[in-house]
Structure formats: C-alpha cells, structure tokens
Amino acid sequence: MGREREGDLREDALRDLIARAGGCAVVDGGFATQLEKHGASINDPLWSALCLIKSPDLIKKVHLEYLEAGADVIVTSSYQATLPGFQSRGLSMEEAESLLTTSVRNAVEARDKFWSSAKRRIGNNYNRALVAASIGSYGAYLADGSEYSGNYGPEVNLEKLKDFHRRRLQVLVEAGPDLLAFETIPNKLEAQACVELLDEEGVLIPSWICFSSVDGENAPSGESFEECLDVINKSSRVGAVGINCAPPHFVLSLIQRFKLRTDKAIVVYPNSGEIWDGIAKKWLPSKCFDDDKFEVFATRWRDAGASLIGGCCRTSPCTVRAISKVLKKERS
Ligand SMILES: C[S+](C)CC[C@H](N)C(=O)O
Ligand SMILES: N[C@@H](CCS)C(=O)O
Ligand SMILES: [Zn+2]
C-alpha cells in the first residue's frame, strides 16, 4: 500500500452519504447484541468474532435486519476479530486473515442484496448503505473490559499499538469496505496510533474514530476529549469523530463540546445505558434507555450537530427503526 496524494482521499464517500440522507445518516445498532438475540453464544475472548468462525450466515442475517430497519451505514463483525486472537485459537495466519476479509464481504454482500431489491420498492426511504469495517480498540482485544478504562499499562506504547493495528487494518482495507470505523478508543495514545497508521499506510477510504466514555466528561483514561480531538484534527484521513458504546445521556453535551473543537463530522452511537462488567462478561442493569427515548434523543443530537447517529450495544433493529423514522420523517 503506497503513499498517495491527499487529493486521492475518498472523503466524498462519507460526505455524499450524509448529504443523501438529508444531513444526518443512520448508523446501525448493537451488532453483537443482535447476534445474541438469535441465539449466538459469544461469552468468549473473541466475543462476536466467534461467529465469523461458527456462524457466518447469522452475520449476514443481522446485517440485513439493520438495513431493513433503515441503517445508512452497517458496521462489520470485526470489532473483536484480530489476528493474534484468531491465532490463539489455533488458526493459521492465512485463515485468520481470511476471516477478516469475510467480515467485510458478508457486509458488502448483504448491502448489495438489500439494495438491489430496496431501490425498486415504490416510495422507499432507503439510501444505498455504506459498509464500515469495524476496528475495535486494543482494549477490546484484551477482552477484560479495558476499552472502558483505557489503562493499557506502561509497556503499551505508541509503536506497540500501531503494530497491533497494522496488519488487520491492511487486510480490512484490502477487502474493500467504504469506510473504517475505529470503535471504543479509550485514550489519546491509541487515537494517535490510529491517526499515524492511516497516514503510514496511505489509507484512502475515510475513517471515523469513536471514543468510549464512562463519566460523560473525559475519555476513559481521564484525558480530556479536547486533547484527543487535537490529535485527530491533524488528520485529513479521519472524516468523522465521536462517541460509541457510552450511555445515551452523556451524548448531547459531548456533541456540543466536540463541535467547539473540531470541524469534522460528528458520529454518535451510544449503547442502551447498561454497564459492561468486563470480568463477569455481562451487562449490569443501570439507567437503561428504550427505543422511544432514542427517537427523542436522535433529533436533539442531530440539532446539536451530529451527522451520523445510531446505537451500540444492547440496542436493536427496533432502535434503528425508531432513529431512522424520526430522522427521515422530514424529508419524505
Ligand atoms: C463492547 S464490550 C461489551 C465487548 C466485549 C469486551 N471486549 C470483552 O471481551 O469483554
Ligand atoms: N460494532 C460493535 C461495537 C461493540 S462496542 C458491535 O456492535 O458489536
Ligand atoms: Zn458497544
């Protein structure tokens, strides 16, 4: 993958989608959550990536459900799919890379299948969706909940994070997604690693970088979002920045703060408000927001300046349907 001229960046893909969606595009919802609803057992260090090995057909089914619900962007099943993770289960490097490729192909095939029939439906309100290849944080790979602490320890430096992300990023880009979605980034160092890697690898498809948050104020590491945004603002390869898998009631004030610090598009797809216990590997009941609430919030988030809105863990196609209904109402 050689270095390319800035002018070749395909940043229009994201801008065009947002414009086609009337100023605010709909991102899908909790992918792993929906796999579980269909009976997948993902209590495993590979989490949802286990389905890439065990039930790839289910992955396609879930993508189709989110498309039918109105998602303008579907995020691939690769959140916790990593080369060392797969290799630790006895897969060869070649097999592991092939699973990453499959995660993108599954989503592209679902998108193409859905669009070929949806575009013919009279009066349909659908856009041709984009496929965003999910790149979960290093903390996601650790499978100990550290995507919500950002505490990677002193031995994890910038180079180590870039090395961790490099080959997966190359394979995913090679598989031909429309976008890259860096998800639940918990600290500034990993944001820096992602930004530098995009440059070093000359990645031409636009990325978004999303942070998690556990206090509604800062990144999980305690670093301010302003510091994190300053890192991201330096990169023309990052088209959007925002928050995912944090509780919905944090989102409005974070959008307002992000708007003061960046000109990039803002992307938000919070979870239901429940809290992940990374050790027990289960969701703890907490202030939980239902789909009606998402419908109300989505308008406020859009009015505050978000241009990509969806749901994350513990949200469902019903959540996305509610978001899509309210955001697309005014243009139908
Ligand atoms: C977004 S969290 C619920 C994903 C799962 C986590 N990385 C774990 O393996 O425990
Ligand atoms: N795209 C991932 C994010 C987990 S935080 C999923 O929905 O499963
Ligand atoms: Zn999530």
Image (cartoon, helix red, strand yellow):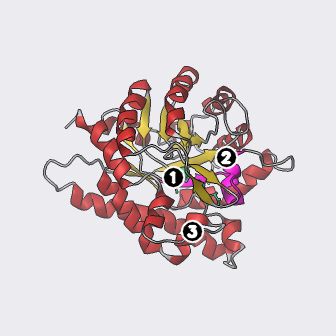
Q: Per the image, is 146 magenta?
A: yes
Instruction: Give the alpha-carbon distance from disc 2 to disc 3, as whole Å.
Output: 19 Å
Q: Is residue 50 above or below residue 234?
A: below
Residue 321 in the image: above or below residue 252: below
Number of numbered callouts drawn: 3
Q: Nearer the viewer, residue 199 or 299?
A: 299
Q: Name the residue type under label 1.
A: Cys
The answer to whether the residue bearing label 2 lies less than 8 angstroms from the nearest atom of ligand 1 is yes
The circle on residue 148 is 2
SS of the residue under disc 1: loop
Q: Which mark is residue 313?
A: 1
Residue 42: numbered disc? 3
Q: Provide residue 30's location: percent of width, then percent of height.
A: 47, 54
Tell me: residue 263, above or below residue 197. Answer: above
In the drawing, does residue 309 fall left or right of residue 325? right
The residue carrying mark 1 has its beta carbon less than 8 Å from ligand 3? yes
**Amino acid type at mark 3:** Ile
